[in-house]
Amino acid sequence: MINNCKAVEIAKNIFWVGAVDWNLRNFHGYETSRGTTYNAYLILDEKVTLIDTAKIDFADEFISRISSVISPEKIDVIISSHVEPDHSGSLKKIAELAPNAEIFTTNPNGLKGLTARYGNLNYKTVKAGDKISVGERSLHFVPTPMLHWPDSMVTYCPEEKILFSNDAFGEHLATSMRFDDENNLDVILAEAKKYYANILMPYGKQAQIALKALGDLEIKMIATGHGVIWRKNISKIIDCYKFWSSDELENRACVVFDSMWHSTEIIAQTITESFAKKNIPAAYYDLKFTPLSDIVTDVFKSKYLIVGSPTINSQMMPTVAKFLSYLKGLQPLKHKGFAFGSFGWSGQSIQFVEDELKEIGVEIIFDKVRLSNVPTIEQLDKLEKEILDLEI
């Protein structure tokens, strides 16, 4: 396929040479309704330097952007911030075009991962505190292990005050405009929160360590691995990361459920409205209609999580089991909540939901709600009163 894609200059002699994936709608179960970008950066200096590559499907677009600035064979240095193929996928292809380029990665995890995927290339390993000169500029390496893979690192250019942050501070967002101030900030921050909740949530402590390591750096631009480049609202995204990586929760509730014949749905509606009457904003999520990744984004910082399911084949609904499994893998913060549901003749599912909530780490604050067949007005009024009387 012929590509005529051009690089975008983000600072003098520093170019964005990534790719835009307008059609991506799923990233490992995380629904990406706005697509994404695979960001890579080219620095023209005494040593021509490439920071990251692109997913292999977009190699032609990526190489076309490089070629619009300089012949790829002139690349001297390649920085691999992260082994995951959305960032390293075109590494072997670009290494073939620039056979003399040195490829810098972390030791031992980056070296191990790149070798396993792409074979023996011209690798050089770096550790915390290491730096290289590429001419008028230098590049300083800061490993950020488990943000979100063991090999992850960021690269700082002090002369330009640019932080090449890879997965940190990014979002899955396809856009033709490269900078934060060229796009809708509310959309960017919403997608950044969704990205953090669905990918980085388990690594809050590692995020705090990384923020501390970067705290003394003067940063005028954050060149991310996905989404927009930050140049105007840097303090906002850093403040968001400080909050998102903390243990602090918001006084909100999420009611998440599935229903067969509306009975569990009716209970969910009563619970949602009862929390609202306690002046606790509550969101109502029917798993048939809302993607898991969107629900998890709200659950992430909400203090209360209430989950409901009817019983089918002596089990909880498959959608509810999938949600709880997805959430468990993200190792959420210490929410408070309870289980609820309707049943016809057995009703085991509600106990199973409660058991899963406990396994996830949810503090059970209310006895599970088990109502047979269709809930009566009297039962719903009683449930509302009990929630209103609940001291939380």
Image (cartoon, rainbow, N blue to C red):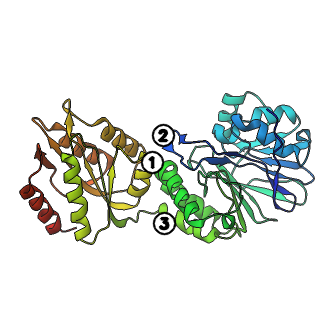
Q: Nearer the viewer, mark 3 or mark 1?
A: 1
Dot 1 falls on a residue whose secondary structure is helix
Residue 106 pos. (x, y %):
69, 44
Left or right position of 180 against 388: right
Quarter where residue 279 is shown: bottom left
Quarter where residue 241 is shown: bottom right
Whole-Å distance between the Cαs marked 1 and 2? 8 Å
Q: Name the amino acid, label 3.
A: Phe
Q: Is residue 108 visible?
A: no
Asked whether the residues under the numbered discs 3 and 1 touch, taking CB atoms below 8 Å apart as contact, a structural biologist would say no
Numbered circle sitting on residue 29: 2
Pointer 3 residue: 243
Pointer 1 residue: 293
Q: Residues within 10 Å of mark 2 (few under 14, many from 20)?
A: few
Residue 338 pos. (x, y %):
22, 53
Whole-Å distance between the Cαs marked 3 and 2? 25 Å
* Marks 3 and 2, the one that precedes in the sequence: 2
Reply above or below: 14 against 32: below
